[in-house]
């Protein structure tokens, strides 16, 4: 790592943000943009991509000025567990419902932490499931089953 990069974590984080922003910007190029008054399908992704790239640029620039810890070991266990939790949520939400899917996603994701505690993870899972039901079902009126077809819902 060059000596002028004083905070490697911020530097690499900034580059990842910029890379994701560029990828989403390239994907959105095939859609019509529209205007602020009549937004097309590309409007929100393009604006979000630009904001993401600006955050990445600010983070990367910040890495040249403040001292920071070096990049540590790659957290493969955490990455795999969080990915599995997200995919499992997507696969289960229709059949098992939002409550079970959110609870399982929180439990599996929490297990990825080195500070994992069954009791606090279960409490967080219950609280998040209740919050998601309140927001998405009652607040927004989305048609996501609370308890899926497995439970007769």
Image (cartoon, grey):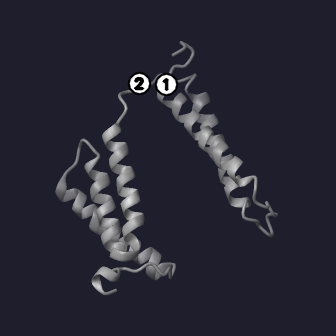
What residue is pinned by disc 2? 69
Q: Residue at x 32, y 49 (%)?
A: 81
Question: Percent from the top left, x then y, of residue 17?
Answer: 58, 40
Q: Nearer the viewer, residue 86 or 60?
A: 86
> How dense is the environment of label 1, judged by Cα within 10 Å: few (below 14), some, or many (20 and up)?
many
- The residue sitting at the top extreme is 3
Question: Percent from the top left, x then y, of residue 104?
Answer: 29, 63
- Label 2 and label 1: CA atoms lie apart by 7 Å
Q: Quadrant of the C terminus?
A: bottom left
Residue 8, labelled with which disc? Answer: 1
Question: Percent from the top left, x then y, of residue 147?
Answer: 33, 80
The answer to which image quadrant residue 127 occupies is bottom left
Q: Residue at x 55, y 14 (%)?
A: 2
- Disc 2 is placed on an element classified as loop
> How dense is the environment of label 2, judged by Cα within 10 Å: few (below 14), some, or many (20 and up)?
few
- Disc 1 is placed on an element classified as helix
């Amino acid at each position: 790592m060059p000596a002028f990069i004083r905070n490697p974590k911020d530097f690499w984080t900034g580059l990842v943000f910029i890379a994701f922003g560029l990828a989403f910007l390239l994907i959105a190029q095939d859609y019509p943009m529209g205007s602020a008054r009549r937004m097309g399908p590309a409007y929100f992704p393009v604006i979000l991509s630009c904001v993401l790239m600006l955050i990445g640029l600010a983070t990367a620039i910040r890495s040249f000025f403040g001292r920071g810890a070096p990049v540590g070991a790659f957290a493969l266990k955490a990455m795999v567990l969080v990915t599995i939790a997200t995919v499992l949520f997507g696969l289960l939400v229709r059949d098992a419902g939002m409550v079970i899917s959110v609870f399982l996603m929180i439990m599996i994701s929490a297990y990825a932490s080195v500070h994992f505690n069954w009791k606090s993870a279960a409490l967080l899972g219950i609280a998040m499931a209740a919050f998601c039901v309140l927001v998405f079902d009652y607040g927004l009126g989305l048609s996501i089953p609370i308890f899926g077809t497995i439970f007769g819902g």
